[in-house]
Image (cartoon, rainbow, N blue to C red):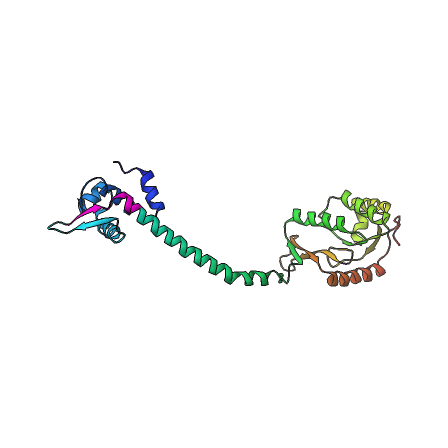
Amino acid sequence: MELDDGAVNDLVSLGLSRYEARVYLALVRRESYTAAEAARAADVPRQRVYDVLDALVRRRLAVLRPGRVATFSAVAPEPALARLMALQRESLERLDEVSAALATALLPVWADGRTHTDPLDYIEVLRDPRAIAERFDSIQEQASRELLSFCKPPFVAPAANNEGIKAVRRLRQAGGTARAIYTHDALDDAEVLENVRRFAEAGEESRFAPGLPLKLVVADASLVLCDMPDPVAGTRATTALYIEHPALAACLRLAFLAVWDQARSAPGTDGG
């Protein structure tokens, strides 16, 4: 018979190495082979065939016949394959025992882990501008009572920020508050002033301050989105933090209100 890849692969799946499978299939073809003949017939390197034949003998898949020149014969396929199957079953039984013991050992560890959370899982670090813009939209949508903003360039939302306009209208209709503080530089930017006017029409209160430490959004005294510019790099690249932490949000709300009290309304706006 030919040493087809299918038979070799089947024997490998039963636990033999590829060389062992090829040599066993070669031995099956006739009564006996010398080591050199088996190497040629199985297309196995001669320097490896001795180890392979020894392994087959140890597995009781081949028989060594001593003589002036030792020869090797294959054990009949039926008992040989039955032996391989028995070895596989023993291996599976051992793995089953190991698996059961490991599951028993890991179960209490897993159960204990369900009661622990990452101490910083309330902080999300954002570096991609698109992800920052998406979080900005999200925090506006989630606000149900109050939305406070430090607004300074560069802006991540489109100048029109229609989602923000909708959020402000929704808040005011529900009796909530929307306030924003801009920098004095915005007074010289017609586009920003037009945006301030549109937000004022929607119900947002706005004021202007000489400067702002960072961009900040606080929603419902529980959610925070703020930027953290790199103080060393000196570029416009920034890292934003999205934080769900009521205590921190409450502190930042107080900081916002302190700046709000010192800020002033722009001419032509309805801010208080």
Which residue is the extreme one toward the top? 1
Quadrant in which the C terminus appears: bottom right
Identified at 63% across, 60% down, the residue is 232
Residue 111 versus residue 11 in the image, above or below: below
Quadrant in which the N terminus appears: top left
Q: Viewer-proximal residue, 26 or 236? A: 26
Q: Viewer-proximal residue, 80 or 153? A: 80
Q: Is residue 84 left or right of residue 118?
A: left
Which of the 4 image quarters holds residue 146? bottom right
Relative image position of residue 158 (x, y in whole percent): 73, 44
Q: Is residue 24 magenta?
A: no
- Magenta segment: 70-81
Q: Is residue 79 left or right of residue 128?
A: left
Residue 216 versus residue 41 in the image, above or below: below
Identified at 61% across, 60% down, the residue is 114
Identified at 47% across, 60% down, the residue is 101
Relative image position of residue 69 (x, y in whole percent): 12, 49
Q: Viewer-proximal residue, 51 or 173? A: 51
